[in-house]
Amino acid sequence: MKERYDVIIVGTGVAGLNAALNLPKEKSVLIICKGAPEESDSELAQGGICRLQGEEDYKSYFDDTMRAGHGENNAAAVDCMLKNSEEATDALISLGVRFARNADGSLAVTREGGHSKNRILFHEDCTGREITEKLMQAVRALGNVEIVQNAVMLDLLTDGNECFGLIIRCGEVTRAVFSDYTVLASGGIGGVFEKSTNFRLLTGDGVAVCLKHGVAVDNVNYIQFHPTTLYSEKKGRSFLISESVRGEGAHLLDKNFNRFTDELQPRDVVTASILRQMQADETPFVWLDMRPIRKEEIKSHFPMIVQKCAEEGIDVFKECVPVVPAQHYFMGGIRSGLDGRTTMNRLYAVGETCCNGVHGANRLASNSLLESIIFAERAGRDISQNYKAADAEAAGRAYASLDMEEYADAEKILSENKKILLKAIKEAENVKPRNTCFGRR
């Protein structure tokens, strides 16, 4: 890493990558990631990405999103996302993203819980990986972007209410890296939970450093649990069984193999129903039956799920799959506007680490990739259109106020950041309880 870049981006998921693609090509850009570039939740997204199905679909899609979010959504953000969904997905196609097609060549669409109609584009059951890989190829083709892996953000470099870069630990070296603008696209908070679909290294670092610096953070206890992850007594990341499985006709069954809920309700409703059934049955899981789906559809649409279950000794064509809810997505986060701006000057936040209100209190399935793509693009364009070099004197004051000895123990800082985040979640939950699964941390 150099000592200075024009823009620093934290995160190599779809939000960070698409922000980079929309920055001026003459500006130097550093993208850092905590582990390997592919260790982002974007890579893990199975179901797909929503696309408005023409003007006649607007009200239905809008209402579905608001209903899933319990009416707490930012209507302006929802409107922005829906109206830009066709352009955003067309842009992905132009980058080579291979969405499934019908026999006539038109885009195939599937359905998930909370949706009143089919409007989700997909690539098998690994849509997130397909999109992320194509975005990464485009970013790596740029001559102005440097990607550094195993680089950990420890803190913001600030003077007053202005951000001038980051304190970064890379290998054995900790240093201040200056920038005119900083974009936090650091993902979710699953790493602070015992059971989560997220990579373990995603521990809400962006949210924690913003809490320390007084940057506004909203709805920090709005945490979504995915209803169906593969039950396992093994440690580590929970394997998600895509909601598209239920969208295509799979059933949820109790210990006696009877259906007990409407599988296509919003995620928080289905999760609560599963937890009640587990308690009534005194079992650590419920059953997911994929056998109502055509065998050919399972093979073509869900090959990764078939393979993972087979590795666990489960034949999805002949038997049911044990599933249990696990932490999945963070609807709260760093307060940001429709342009990605936070309450700190020169600091932007996009993707799962931010809260622009588009999801409300509960995310509608397959809105996450779309939100990240659209608002990251808007953030990149906002920086481009309003670019102004940082004041060197103020940046100097920010550096002069540092005591680098405070950052000598990176693991201690990351541990403290987790405590800051969990404390904020607990306090928010005490004020306005939102999460029936919070005790599963």
Image (cartoon, rainbow, N blue to C red):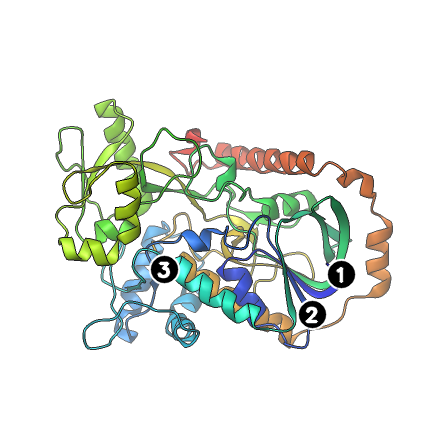
Tell me the element at label 2. loop
- Judged left or right of residue 294, residue 131 is right
Pointer 3 residue: 127
Can you tell which of label 1 and label 2 is closer to the viewer? 1
**Please, is residue 166 above or below residue 58 in the view?**
above
Near-viewer residue (292 or 417): 292
**Please, is residue 203 above or below residue 382 in the view?**
above
| Residue 92 can be seen in this image | yes
Task: Measure the C-alpha gap from mark 3 to mark 2.
Answer: 30 Å
Pointer 1 residue: 2
Pointer 2 local density, CA inside 10 Å: few below 14, some 14–19, many at least 20: some
Residue 267 image point, x, y percent: 32, 45
Near-viewer residue (358 or 397): 397
Name which residue type carries label 1. Answer: Lys
Residue 262 image point, x, y percent: 19, 44
Name which residue type carries label 2. Answer: Ser
Q: Earlier in the sequence, mark 3 or mark 2?
A: 2
**Please, is residue 122 above or below residue 154 in the view?**
below
Task: Measure the C-alpha gap from mark 1 to mark 2.
Answer: 10 Å
**Please, is residue 277 above or below residue 73 in the view?**
above
Task: Measure the C-alpha gap from mark 3 to mark 1.
Answer: 34 Å
Tell me the element at label 1. loop
| Residue 113 can be seen in this image | no
Q: Mark 3 touching mark 1, by CB under 8 A? A: no
- Judged left or right of residue 24, residue 396 is right
Which label sits on residue 28? 2
Near-viewer residue (33 or 326): 33
